[in-house]
Amino acid sequence: MSTKKIVWSSEHGDLRKKNQNTASAKSLPPQQQTIYLHRESSGRGGKAVTLVKNLVLSADDLKSLAKKLKQECGTGGTIKDGMIEIQGEQREKMADILRKLGYKVKIAGG
């Protein structure tokens, strides 16, 4: 008996992408999440970005949280691979914002 998953179907296309989207369809409440804030500058020409990791949010909730953080910090950002990237060193400011929303926050990285 084979337990291999089908990854491509001529009728439905790439099934791996569909499986990833359904896995993160539900959001956990903020009180049940611990978010990690990282500072990263490698590969960005020395410019720092703040990464928000360990989020369990639907795509819509992730977008709205990213929008709120960008507005509060007064800077740009994006969503990549389920993480929010905010331009600049914004960890302390973002930690305050996220705590007010009910998240547990840990500041990591140097």
Image (tube, helix red, strand yellow):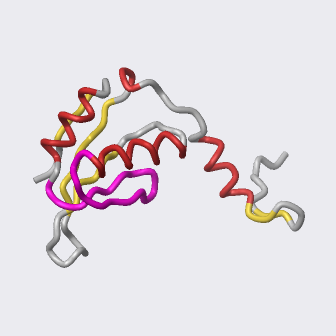
Residue 38 painted magenta? no
Left or right of residue 14, residue 110 in this image: left
Report the residue at 38% width, 49% height from top. Answer: 67
Q: Residue furthest right?
A: 11
Split into 4 quadrants, where in the image is the N terminus? Answer: top right
Which of 21/98 is in front? 98
Q: Is residue 28 above or below residue 88?
A: above
Which segment is the magenta one?
Answer: 72-89
Q: Position of residue 105 (x, y in %)?
A: 23, 33
For the image, the number of numbered tags is: 0
Residue at coordinates 49% horizontally, 39% vertically from top-left?
A: 61
- In the rendered image of this protein, does residue 44 appear above or below residue 17? below
The question of residue 82 being in magenta is answered with yes
Whole-percent x, y for residue 18 in the image: 70, 52
Measured from the top left, where is residue 30 in percent x and y?
38, 26
Extreme residue in the bottom direction: 45
Q: Residue furthest top?
A: 31
- The one nearer the camera, 34 or 72, is 72
> Which residue is located at x 16 percent, y 70 percent?
47
Q: Is residue 1 left or right of residue 103?
A: right
Q: Nearer the viewer, residue 75 or 40?
A: 75
* Closer to the camera in the image, 75 or 78: 75
- Placement of 72 over or under 81, stated as above or below: above
Q: Can you tell which quarter of the image residue 11 is in?
A: bottom right
